[in-house]
Image (tube, coloured by chain):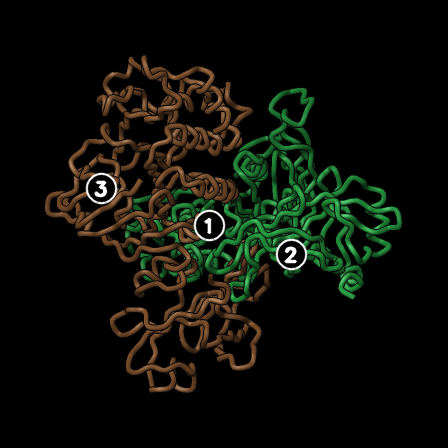
Amino acid sequence: MELSLRGVSHKVGAQQHLYPMDLRLAPNAVTVLLGATQAGKTTLMRLMAGLDRPSEGTITVDGTDVTGWPVRKRDVAMVYQQFINYPSMTVRDNIASPLRLRPSTAGTRPAPRGGMAVLGGGPADGQILRPSTAGTRPAPRGGMAVLGGGPADGQLLHPSRGQLDRDAIRRRVDELATKLHIEMHLDKLPAQLSGGQQQRVALARALAKQAPLMLLDEPLVNLDYKLREELREELGQLFATGESTVVYATTEPAEALQLGGYTAVMDAGELLQYGPTAEVFHRPASLRVARAFSDPPMNLVIAQGLGDRLQLRPGVELALPGQGGVTVGVRANALRVTGQPGDLAIKGEVELAEISGSDTFVHARTEIGELVAQLTGVHDFELGAPLTLYLNAAHVHVFDAAGLLTRAPERQGAR
Amino acid sequence: MARIDLDLAHAYRPDPKEDADYALLPLKMSFEDGGAYALLGPSGCGKTTMLNIVSGLLRPSHGTVRFDGRDVTALTPQQRNIAQVFQFPVIYDTMTVAENLAFPLRNRGVPADRIKARVGRIAEMLELNGQLNQRAAGLSADAKQKISLGRGLVREDVSAVLFDEPLTVIDPHLKWQLRRKLKQIHQELKLTLVYVTHDQVEALTFADRIVVMTRGRAVQVGTAGELFERPSHRFVGHFIGSPGMNFLPAALEEGGGLSVAGQPVAGAVDAVTGAALSRAEPFALGIRPEYVELEEIGDGSAHARPGTITGTVAQVQDIGTYWLVTAQAGPHTLKARLSAHARPPAPGASIALRVLNPHTCFYGADEQLIAAATVAAAQEGLA
């Protein structure tokens, strides 16, 4: 499905939560909303879901204006940070719940639409069913509550009675559970599972809906890093099948890069840039985007353009054209500790070597300011040891006085 | 300061029968006097249990805890003279920063002039000296946690200082500075520090030695470099590094040659490695994505290159600061990490993957390291 926002903004009282933005999501692909906390990611998702109404602007789905439509008329699946499942249902029933007719949840049932049979029982209904929330966060953030509205999946429906074929449900649940590696836990209750497994159940249920729009709000934030890594990879593969338009909010640049797809960079209620993820990362349109989309932070050095070269400080120059005040941006992985011909040598001393496992991030105090260099593998550095960092002019970004990108490194492998 | 020796186990039930009955499986371990240690592992691995046994909050069901040779198993944290720092700030809001820092010393009747000197020194190290006379109540969460850290470090006579995820509340942008502070403080004060975390960056950055734990077992104690280069257990290979180590089934051929993922690998392993492997079949080859070298081989018919297996490129991901190539060798998947400045192969391309080089490790059916390829083996492979 194609979701478009035109001139959409959101105001609460005098507070502008979202500034007017235009955004046409790539259909049937994943779009990452990337930004720090308070950037407006959840606010934007609530507008997309129909949980809130934009103050201005229009939202269209496949060309139809749905701006005022309530959430129960939309066909949306959602996954939150905390693991929301029905505590008294088995994993199998949790996953199957959007596929089943559940007349008892009449309050959350969507209105019949276009002659389609009605499927009630959306994901965890905060008010009615008291979801079991594991993890440390006490309550759903921003009060995202009820989403009724099951999938409108014609094949699985019994057209006459609006009921699902039992075998079809079983097959679908088995298939999803296998994809998410929880097939051995189908008869357990959510509380018997680890946090990572509980979130897989919530993800499987959201996928079971086969909703054309799937919204995920920092779904992995409460998990251990190794689990996050594994789930990110699995999700990336699931999203790549192109069955849904997926929106995935995160504060972590690494998550956006690993998921691929498209990225919308947000900051302080503004949409700064939208495009293919790698493209946005390698060609951030502005300093603000570069800051938001880098971890460790992009090294930024104020420089003076002297025509044919950029002076970082007297005697420390890059052979790049420029005039007047500019900012040179150096990604941490562009700095090396062994020089190559033509490199600029920058002298300094080690403040700390942070080791992530695959990478060592060396924080250094240098003649052109504080820098962070990213080296592959584990390297030992004494605190305070002298260190020379090397930089090739071809690997830097340059931003003009207004903070807009004027030069980006050429991509070797870009296709 | 003390050297701490553990020779113990902790079971959930009085007569443990299987591994699942233990929170901590039987282990022998020492924390050297003045060392900085991290206990690292996923939730439920037993790291907090181990910390609580060291501190005296928990008495092990079996075995002993010794401080400098003295059996302290039955002693309380106070009797063991342990200082602790927890996830969340534990301070007195009504006291000033200086009073908070002085509290553990005053409690023990340390003379006022010595308290003043020590508080001054700790405050300076943690960059709290500008706020010494401020009431703690009005401070940010970061500053409060710094006070907690300071209170843990202020006494010179403690046996050890134990930290339980102490940087959880710290703003991510300030974390590295506090990690640096803790490292500096350790170098200056030479206290025995034990630090529990599930964050690998924190553990690998802070500690001289990291204890990697999984399912109640300490599977390796080593430096960050050792964990990366020579994981002594497959779990360590998997857990440290993103993505973790690749593992492929391997076997010794009749003539002493090696086959990996069902393919013969040209260039033999050396005699020592070979002898170790011949006693340990079946085994697996482990190589980190950072150390897999790739070469395109055009039509795929090229003759076997030393130390390599062949495969096809399944996926190429631009992770921004590096390329991640997923390759398929028969039914086996492996990942290779290439520099962002390299030119990656195209999806579908036939490639040679060098899996035998000085960074290659071999693991037995019990997941333990059997042997590592020596430099000689790799050079032979490259010849």
Residue A291 point in image, percent of width and height: 34, 61
Judging from the image, what is the letter of the chain drawn in green? B
Decide which of tag 1 and tag 3 comes sooner along the chain.
3
Residue A184 point in image, percent of width and height: 55, 24
A295 and A20: which is toward the camera: A20
Q: Which residue is label 3 attached to?
A: A63
Q: Which residue is label 1 attached to?
A: A258
- Quarter of image, res A144: top left
The three-letter amino acid code for the residue at tag 3 is: Gly
Residue extending furthest toward the left: A14
Judging from the image, what is the letter of the chain drawn in brown? A
- Judged by depth in the image, the label closer to the viewer, 3 or 2, is 3
Residue A402 horizontal side relative to residue A249, left or right: left
- Quarter of image, res B64: top right
Instruction: Tell me if residue B360 comes above or below residue B89 in the rendering.
Output: below
Residue A223 visible in the displayed image:
yes
The three-letter amino acid code for the residue at tag 1 is: Gln
The three-letter amino acid code for the residue at tag 2 is: Ile
